[in-house]
Structure formats: C-alpha cells, structure tokens
Amino acid sequence: MADRFAAAGVIVPEPQAAFYLYPDFAPWREHLAERHGVTTGAGLAGYLLDRYGVGVLPASAFGEEEPLLRARVATGLLYGDTAEQREEALAAADPAGLPWIADSLRRLEDVLAGLAP
C-alpha cells in the first residue's frame, strides 16, 4: 500500500511493522486546493470519504497542525474480511496477488488517480 502512495507522488514514510501508513499530500497542496477545494488534513479526510467512500483520519486528530495534509491510513482490513482470508494472506508468499488484496490495491490506485494532479 505504501508503494502505491509513493508511486502516485505522495510522501509516505517507510512502514515500520505497524498497521498504519502516514501519507503526506503536501506535494499536491496547490492542486488539491484549486481543483478540489481541499486545504487542510480534515478537509482531505472529508473529501476522501464523501467522494470516494475512503475513510482516513487527519493528522490533526493526533495533535498535528490542521493545515498539514497528512493522514493516518489503517491497513489492517487489507488482509481480508474473514479469519480465513487473513490467515491465507499472512501465509501467502505474495499476499498482493490474492484477489481481495489486489482489488483493494487497485481501488487505492483508482482513488489516487482521481485525486492526483
């Protein structure tokens, strides 16, 4: 998932064995403001939810300044909706190739493409 954000031009720190990513949309600031009216992290979170049905938390929910365009993205549900899917994902040599994970990653790519400059 981090690779998809990075490929789209979003700054995302390398994950450190956690269930969250912290993408920073600062490189897209001007575009987001002009094209989508998004100027804050909370605005970005609201736009992603309203336009794409994607739920993220703005960095301001964790004490960062409101104008920052950073978000917290949970990745835990990527592994599947059922215990069986999650177990299969954890045991897979290529989890990204599993259909439900591949579908989620494609959905993220589509959302980023729709939002991108």
Image (cartoon, rainbow, N blue to C red):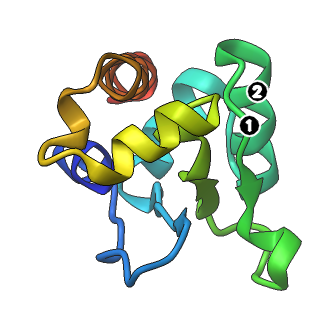
Residue behind mark 1: 55
Which amino acid, by three-letter code, is at mark 2? Leu
Q: Nearer the viewer, residue 116 or 53?
A: 53
Callout 2: few (<14), some (14-19), or many (20+) C-alpha neighbours within 10 Å?
A: few
Please determine whether, in this image, residue 18 is positioned above or below residue 76: below
Is the Cβ of the residue at disc 2 closer than 8 Å to that at disc 1?
Answer: yes
> In terms of sequence position, does the residue under pointer 2 or pointer 1 come before the other?
2
Which amino acid, by three-letter code, is at mark 1? Gly
Q: Is residue 95 visible?
A: yes
Please determine whether, in this image, residue 86 is positioned above or below residue 50: below
Left or right: 18, with 16 as reference point: right
Left or right: 109, with 46 as reference point: left
- In terms of image quadrants, where is residue 34? top right
Secondary structure beneath dot 2 equals: helix
Residue behind mark 2: 49
Q: Nearer the viewer, residue 102 or 21?
A: 102
Residue 8: % across, % down: 24, 40
Please determine whether, in this image, residue 72 is positioned above or below residue 113: below
Residue 24: % across, % down: 47, 63
